Image (cartoon, helix red, strand yellow):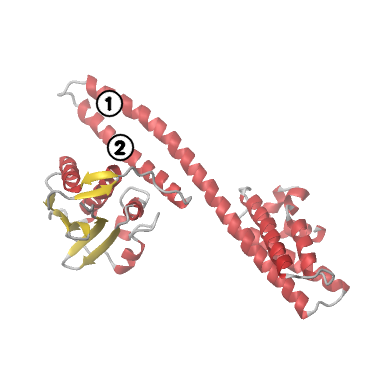
């Protein structure tokens, strides 16, 4: 370990900030495990092999977790530590006697498994830290936004309708709502990455009325851009709030990226097996390459790079629909425009 520490301090930049005990971390425990694997005096039963592997994984996970907790360490530096350890092990052992093929294979295999375990835990710990940061940040930001929003609403109530400040206050309030939506998207994406499910409250919904309400609200903001074609009495067991979020997201995307001179058509239908909602806009098609990343988080197509947002909207749309046991598809072609097709289960009456 002393030889390894000297080399690590020379070759791994982050190591210079650690004292000897913190730098060596759990590696002495790992070496003890490797000694047992190399020993000719220990009977290597299947049970013993499984126990040793489990213990080695625990030790290397601990090492990966510790390294991820230090801001200076990168995954590359973590892997480099194990590469140095392998070189030092061969150097020290072969000074005593030449290693046999079986012994070399044991060491190489053990180091490879150790690297994989430590690197996986390093990555997982970083994700956990990032998710905790996101949750904390979004919570604090929403608290500040609520304060600003309350002040803006108070200002709207106090000014005269003819006052120019009404328009300013309205614009501020709309901007706050967009920021709040972006923060909610970030928070939900963080929950999904952490393996948590979205908090959905299911109830019987009349989707025809819900879509109509969304269209009316969007028309107030974006003008007479929307045409609704809908069957009547379309019911589904859904989270009203989240399905509304899906419809708004897809419709607003159609406004942003569609041909501004053509209408956006929302078609709501039901069959014997499912409910279908299609949101169609004319305009430039979405390429197959862009379609392949469309529903991934933090990924944006070239045409979307000039728009504000996290690149989370369609990722969350897909997650919400799948939580409803539904599906979403995209059809886009030159001269035919773009259609997003949502299919949801039908309530069996």
Circle 1 — which element? Answer: helix
In the picture, residue 264 is in which quadrant?
A: bottom left
First along the sequence among labels 1 and 2: 1
Residue tagged by mark 2? 177
Instruction: Tell me: 283 left or right of 78.
Output: left
Q: Residue at x 23, y 45 (%)?
A: 205
Residue 12 appears in view: no
Identify which residue is drawn at 25% across, 29% down. Answer: 169
Number of marks in the rendered image: 2
Q: In the orientation shown, which residue stands out farthest toward the right?
A: 96
203 sits left or right of 21 in the view: left
Q: Is residue 278 left or right of residue 300?
A: left
**Label for residue 260?**
none
Q: Is residue 193 above or below residue 339?
A: above
> Residue 275, percent across and down?
21, 56
Instruction: Left or right? Give the position of 94 relative to 218.
Output: right
- Quadrant placement of the N terminus: bottom right
Q: Position of residue 130 (x, y in %)?
A: 51, 47
Return the residue nearer the eye: 164 or 295.
295
What is the x, y in percent for residue 252?
Answer: 23, 49
- Residue at label 1? 153
Q: Disc 1 versus disc 2: distance between alpha carbons? A: 12 Å
């Amino acid at each position: 370990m002393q030889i390894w520490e000297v080399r690590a301090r020379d070759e791994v930049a982050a190591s210079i900030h650690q004292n000897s005990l913190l730098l060596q971390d759990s590696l002495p425990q790992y070496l003890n495990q490797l000694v047992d694997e190399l020993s000719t005096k220990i009977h290597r039963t299947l049970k013993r092999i499984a126990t040793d592997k489990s213990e080695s994984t625990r030790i290397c996970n601990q090492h990966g977790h510790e390294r991820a907790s230090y801001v200076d360490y990168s995954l590359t530096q973590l892997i480099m530590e194990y590469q140095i350890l392998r070189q030092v092990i061969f150097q020290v052992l072969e000074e005593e006697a030449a290693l046999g093929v079986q012994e070399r294979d044991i060491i190489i295999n053990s180091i490879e498994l150790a690297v994989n375990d430590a690197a996986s835990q390093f990555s997982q710990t970083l994700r956990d830290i990032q998710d905790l940061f996101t949750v904390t940040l979004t919570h604090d930001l929403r608290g500040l936004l609520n304060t600003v929003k309350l002040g803006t609403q108070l200002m709207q109530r106090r000014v005269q309708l003819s006052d120019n400040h009404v328009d300013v206050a309205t614009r501020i309030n709309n901007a706050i709502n967009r920021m709040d939506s972006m923060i909610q998207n970030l928070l939900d994406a963080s929950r999904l990455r952490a393996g948590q499910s979205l908090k959905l409250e299911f109830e019987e919904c009349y989707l025809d009325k819900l879509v109509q309400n969304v269209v009316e609200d969007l028309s107030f903001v974006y003008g007479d851009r929307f045409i609704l074609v809908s069957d009547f009495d379309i019911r589904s067991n859904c989270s009203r709030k989240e399905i509304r979020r899906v419809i708004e997201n897809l419709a607003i995307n159609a406004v942003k990226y569609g041909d501004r001179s053509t209408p956006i058509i929302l078609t709501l239908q039901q069959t014997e097996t499912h409910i279908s909602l299609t949101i169609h806009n004319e305009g430039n098609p979405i390429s197959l390459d862009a379609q392949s990343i469309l529903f991934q988080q933090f990924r944006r197509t070239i045409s979307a790079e000039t728009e504000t947002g996290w690149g989370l909207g369609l990722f969350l749309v897909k997650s919400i629909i799948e939580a409803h046991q539904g599906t979403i598809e995209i059809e886009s072609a030159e001269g035919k425009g773009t259609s997003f097709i949502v299919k949801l289960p039908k309530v069996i009456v």
